[in-house]
Structure formats: C-alpha cells, structure tokens
C-alpha cells in the first residue's frame, strides 16, 4: 500500500511540473508574436514598429481605388464622413473624434503599414473598431489606396 501511495505522489508531482513547464513555454512563445488580427493593440499601430516598414502590395490603380471607395462608403464613412474629413454622423459623439483623413498625418500612424494595422486591429481607447473579421487584407489595402486618393499622399 505504501508503494502505491508513493507512486501516486511521484506521478502527481511529475504531472504538476509538466503542467507548469507547459504554461511557462506557452507564455514565452506568445509574448514574442505579432498582434493577432482583430485585437486592439495598446495605443494603436504606432506601438508596432514593424508596421511602418510594411508596404502596400496592391497597386493604387483605378480598380483598387474604386473598390476601396465602395468599402469606405460601407464601413468608414459613418464615422470618418463621406469626404474623409472626420465629420460622419456616427463619429459626432466619439471621443476622440475620428481623424480628418485628408490630413497628411494621424495620431495612430500615417504610413500604409500603420494604417493597415489600425484598420485591421482597431485602436484602443478610440471608436476605431477592428475590421479583421469584415475585410480581407486585400480589401484593407484597397481602402488605404482610396484614402490616399482623397488626401495628401505623404508617408507611404
């Protein structure tokens, strides 16, 4: 009987150590990953230096800009306004107010890569929700091409 109890204790201790090690390993792996689509990064894309290095793989041609405008009208104009001035009816009560997208720079990033992450992941403590589940990456790039077409094309 004593051997059975001793064997049970040993098995329990080994199981507990394996569980603790697994949790520590999992935590270490997830700490170094890039933010997952649909999550709010802390403070917006400017917290992710890799975003500024991302380039838009979708050519800003008439087809992409037209597709981006259609998506913008459906998903963005309510807050950012029909012309991108930040004066949409749904954005009137937001604090902070939606940015004027015809300006050259915005608080949460102004490069194409930063815009991509803000659209995909949203921006914490703002009304900007994530669109990762509503728009494909290609569609997000189309929206960026449209936004670039209505304002200064700086900071690509």
Image: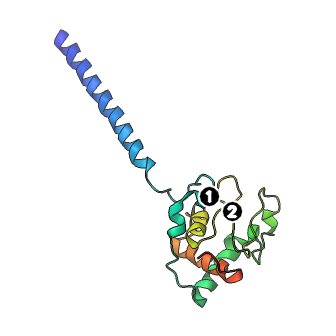
Question: Quadrant where the C terminus lies?
Answer: bottom right
Q: Position of residue 15 (x, y in %)?
A: 29, 29
Element class at badge 2? loop
- What's the CA distance linking mark 2 and mark 1? 8 Å
Q: Nearer the viewer, mark 2 or mark 1?
A: 2
Q: Does residue 70 show up?
A: no
Closer to the chain start, of discs 2 and 1, is 1
Helix, strand, or loop for circle 1? Answer: loop
Q: Is residue 126 left or right of residue 133?
A: right
**Crowding near the residue tagged with mark 2, few <14, some 14–19, many ≥20 C-alpha atoms within 10 Å:** few
Residue 139 in sight from this viewpoint: yes
Query: What residue is rendered at 53% in x and 65% in y?
Result: 51
- Residue sitting at x 57%, y 64%: 117
Labelled pair 2, 1 in contact (Cβ < 8 Å): yes
- Where residue 18 sits in the image (x, y, percent)? 30, 33
Q: Kindly identify which residue carries mark 2.
A: 107
Residue 141 — which label?
A: none
| Colour pattern of the rendering | rainbow
Question: Is residue 148 shown above or below 36?
Answer: below
Q: Nearer the viewer, residue 128 or 112?
A: 112
Horizontal side of 21 relative to 69 (left or right) equals: left
Residue 44 - label: 1
Question: What is the quadrant of residue 40 in the picture?
Answer: bottom right
- The spot of residue 34 in percent (x, y) is 47, 57
Image quarter of the N terminus:
top left
Q: To which quarter of the image does residue 111 belong? A: bottom right
Tell which residue pokes out farthest to the top in this image: 2
Q: Residue visible at 81% across and 69% down?
A: 87
For label 1, count other residues whose C-alpha is less than 10 Å away and answer few (under 14), some (14-19) or many (20+): many
Q: Give 34 or 50, whichever is nearer the viewer.
A: 50
Q: Judge by depth and name the residue closer to the eye, 106 or 86.
A: 106
- Percent position (x, y) of residue 14? 26, 27
């Amino acid at each position: 009987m004593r051997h059975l109890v001793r064997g049970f204790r040993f098995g329990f201790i080994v199981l507990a150590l394996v569980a603790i090690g697994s949790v520590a390993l999992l935590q270490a792996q997830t700490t170094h990953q890039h933010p997952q689509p649909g999550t709010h990064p802390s403070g917006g894309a400017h917290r992710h230096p890799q975003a500024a290095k991302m380039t838009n793989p979708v050519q800003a041609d008439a087809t992409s800009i037209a597709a981006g405008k259609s998506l913008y009208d459906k998903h963005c104009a309510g807050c950012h306004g029909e012309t991108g001035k930040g004066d949409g009816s749904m954005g009137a009560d937001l604090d902070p107010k939606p940015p004027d997208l015809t300006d050259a720079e915005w608080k949460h990033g102004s490069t194409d890569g930063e815009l991509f992450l803000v659209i995909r992941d949203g921006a914490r403590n703002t009304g900007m929700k994530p669109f990762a589940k509503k728009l494909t990456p290609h569609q997000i790039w189309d929206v960026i091409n449209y936004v670039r077409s209505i304002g200064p094309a700086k900071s690509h």
